[in-house]
Image: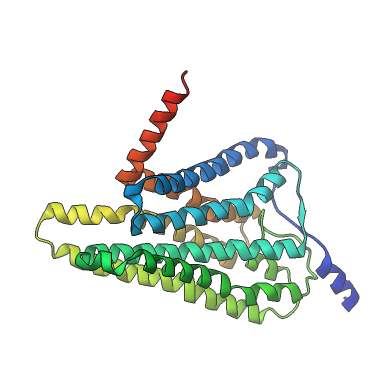
């Protein structure tokens, strides 16, 4: 293939994949997806509203939860127009520049969520293992610095590998395996040297997702060691219960990532529908489940939401 032909391919659009084999049912599939996105937006906005308006929730733990809800909200916003646009027949293709921008936000938000979960693990560790110094360690100023560090870590490490996508040649069929753009999907259809992207992407995964997971695991080993040393059984149970929501959030985040990685790495023989489903689970499952988990397991948030619904029922008579 000539260089002119390759260049033309590189400048063309990419075809997004909806749900292969289910095209005639797109309007019906759009209904549950619209409901899921609505739940993502309403759930995370409600968590943010409750934390902002309830003075009793102006504590480090809930500041980190607000960061998590904001990250989940942005993740939903970064993909909703593409997924629903495909299902409604409004979108079929995406330009290279738009695809690169979307992949930057998706991966950046994923790293940000991992960093927030790490910060929340640190919060639990200090609260249980060093409770007397909790207030002096996690001051408002320290939380602001942690928030800025999370933002910088998530946004400044990714550009080298994302910008490189702009200068790759794409000479394979421009068909992506998801309803949105991911870095691994773009380099799959590239026909130029992708060693830098592959090596740097592996470095990002190890230095962010894997490192965060290992540190979170170590923090819980130390927490468990401290809790088991508590004489009172009731106090042990109470201490462990404060960690349940965070453990659920960690599992909800990492299990879809592992599943999607396995599908991309070893699932080339699988149906394209499996790739699409795993991609949507990776994007939507954490933002959908986190507000539910924290609303159920966190007493302060549950009571505030119940009060909010009660006031709404009074103001809007049947």
Q: Nearer the viewer, residue 94 or 159?
A: 159
> Which residue sits at x=38%, y=48%?
294
Quarter of the image for residue 128 reads bottom left
Q: Is residue 230 left or right of residue 112?
A: left
Q: Nearer the viewer, residue 277 or 42?
A: 42
Q: Would you place residue 128 above or below residue 162 in this image?
A: above
Quarter of the image for residue 185 reads bottom right
Q: Nearer the viewer, residue 315 or 282?
A: 315
Give the farthest residue toward the top.
Answer: 318
Residue 277 shows in this picture? no
Q: Would you place residue 79 above or below residue 130 in this image?
A: above
Quarter of the image for residue 266 reads bottom right
> Which residue sits at x=67%, y=48%?
81
Q: How many marks?
A: 0
> Which residue sits at x=55%, y=42%?
36
| Residue 313 pos. (x, y %) | 43, 25
| Residue 229 pos. (x, y %) | 13, 65
Q: Is residue 265 left or right of residue 93?
A: left
Q: Would you place residue 102 above or below residue 46 in this image?
A: below
| Residue 304 pos. (x, y %) | 36, 40
């Amino acid at each position: 293939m000539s260089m002119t032909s390759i260049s033309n391919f590189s400048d063309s659009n990419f075809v997004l994949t909806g749900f292969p084999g289910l095209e005639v049912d797109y309007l019906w599939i759009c209904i549950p997806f619209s409901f899921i996105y609505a739940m993502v937006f309403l759930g995370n906005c409600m968590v943010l509203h409750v934390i902002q308006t309830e003075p009793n929730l102006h504590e480090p733990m809930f500041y980190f939860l607000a960061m998590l809800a904001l990250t989940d909200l942005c993740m939903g916003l970064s993909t909703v127009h593409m997924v629903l646009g495909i299902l409604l027949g409004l979108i079929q293709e995406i330009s290279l520049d738009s695809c690169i921008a979307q992949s930057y936000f998706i991966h950046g938000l994923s790293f940000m969520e991992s960093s927030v979960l790490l910060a929340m693990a640190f919060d639990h560790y200090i609260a249980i293992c060093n409770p007397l110094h909790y207030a002096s360690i996690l001051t408002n100023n320290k939380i602001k610095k942690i928030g800025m560090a999370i933002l910088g870590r998530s946004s400044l490490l990714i550009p080298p590998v994302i910008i490189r996508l702009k200068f790759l040649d794409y000479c394979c069929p421009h068909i992506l395996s998801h309803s949105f753009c991911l870095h691994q999907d773009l380099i799959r259809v590239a026909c130029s040297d992708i060693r830098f992207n592959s090596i740097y992407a592996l470095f990002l995964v190890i230095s962010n997702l894997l490192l965060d997971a290992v540190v979170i695991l170590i923090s819980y080993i130390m927490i468990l060691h401290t809790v088991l040393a508590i004489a009172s059984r009731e106090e042990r149970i109470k201490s462990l219960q404060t960690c349940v929501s965070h453990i659920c959030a960690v599992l909800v985040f990492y299990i879809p990532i592992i599943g999607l990685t396995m599908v991309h790495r070893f699932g080339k023989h699988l149906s394209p529908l499996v790739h699409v489903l795993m991609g949507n689970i990776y994007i939507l499952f954490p933002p959908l489940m986190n507000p539910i988990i924290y609303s159920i397991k966190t007493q302060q948030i549950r009571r505030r939401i119940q009060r909010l619904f009660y006031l709404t029922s009074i103001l809007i008579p049947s």
